[in-house]
Image (cartoon, rainbow, N blue to C red):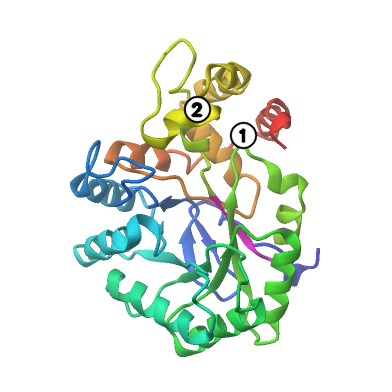
Amino acid sequence: MTESSQAPSPSLDRQTVTLTPNGPEISALGVGTWSWGDSLFWQYGQDYGAGDVQQAFEASLGAGITFFDTAEIYGLGKSEQLLGQFIQGTDRPVTVATKYFPLPWRFNAQSVADALTASLKRLQLPTVALYQVHWPFDFLMGQKVLMNALADEVNQGRIQSIGVSNYSASQMHKAHGYLAERGIPLAVNQVQYSLLHRKIESNGVLTAAQDLGITILAYSPLAQGLVTGKYTVDAGQPPTGARRIDPRFSSDNLRKIEPVITVLREMGQRHGKTPAQVALNWLIGQGNVVPIPGAKTASQAQQNAGALGWTLTPEEQGKIGQVTLAWL
């Protein structure tokens, strides 16, 4: 890997990452806001509400986490609206990423501009640090048209950097190539990545990202709570919402992951950290990975922030990697 293509990495204090050589700076840990305003998968409006997620927002900022990832489809726009309201109520710097969903009827460059306009209105912002393509769907608009439309928005100043989400290694290379023709780097690929979902290490995505200088935004970095140790066979505490019917939370699977939880607890005891903080720290330690765990409450936000400011030893990293090989 040449120096010019080397992937971004956290600064020495592991608090920030710069997207692309001259791109925006984000905190080395972000906040995913899928659950903000979403009552379909999550229980927004029942188990928690606007006041709770506002406290999560404020607690994150208080802990130095300033990067928030949202999308136009989260809560059908409600997530963006809430985030925009919270930003208006603080004088602290906040870095925002949102996403464009390539719906079938969005078949030209103008549809990209219109979607961005709507997102910026909900966010109450003139520009966002990162604008991502939510899924690699082509439909009637090919990737080249899409990337050129996004490049136009960079030139107009409404977005500062371009990202993709759920792209394969080959799809990343194509998007990177189209943007390179415009002199604009591809900043991120947002993909599912956790100790219980390590597929990007074996399918070429992580390697391609490192080679191209692309940051991985890791969504569901806590496997929707599975690696926190909260859900065990003995505890008998089922998850809420749609996770109740997720086979990953079955007794059989909870038994399967018991060795993982045991190691995370062991590492956590050494460092005075929780299993969740250890799991997030392991991801950060991969070098060009920024986890974006969700946070519905202030306590969840504060716990997530505890993943920063310390480092697992290479031996500890290796032991965690070994016990989770089945999820490669």
Q: Nearer the viewer, residue 117 or 89?
A: 117
For the question of whether residue 128 can be seen, the reply is yes
Q: Which residues are magenta?
A: 210-218
Image coordinates for residue 161, horizontal then vertical, percent: 52, 74
Q: Quadrant of residue 20?
A: bottom right
* Residue at x 60%, y 85% (from the top left corner): 148
Q: Is residue 139 placed above or below 85 in the rendered structure?
A: below
Q: Nearer the viewer, residue 3 or 55?
A: 55
Between discs 1 and 2, the one toward the N terminus: 1
| SS label for mark 2 | helix
Which residue matches tag 2? 275
- What's the residue type where badge 1 is placed? Leu
- What's the residue type where badge 2 is placed? Pro
Q: Cβ–Cβ below 8 Å for labels 1 and 2?
A: no
Q: Is residue 57 left or right of residue 259?
A: left
Other-residue count near label 1 (Cα within 10 Å), few / some / many at <14 / 14–19 / ≥20: many
Image coordinates for residue 227, horizontal then vertical, percent: 52, 29
Q: Quadrant of residue 72?
A: bottom left
Image coordinates for residue 313, horizontal then vertical, percent: 65, 34
* Residue at x 46%, y 32% (from the top left corner): 225
* Residue at x 65%, y 78% (from the top left corner): 142
Q: Is residue 183 placed above or below 210 in the rendered structure?
A: below
Q: Can residue 217 be found in the magenta stretch?
A: yes
Which residue matches tag 1? 196
Is label 1 or label 2 in front?
1
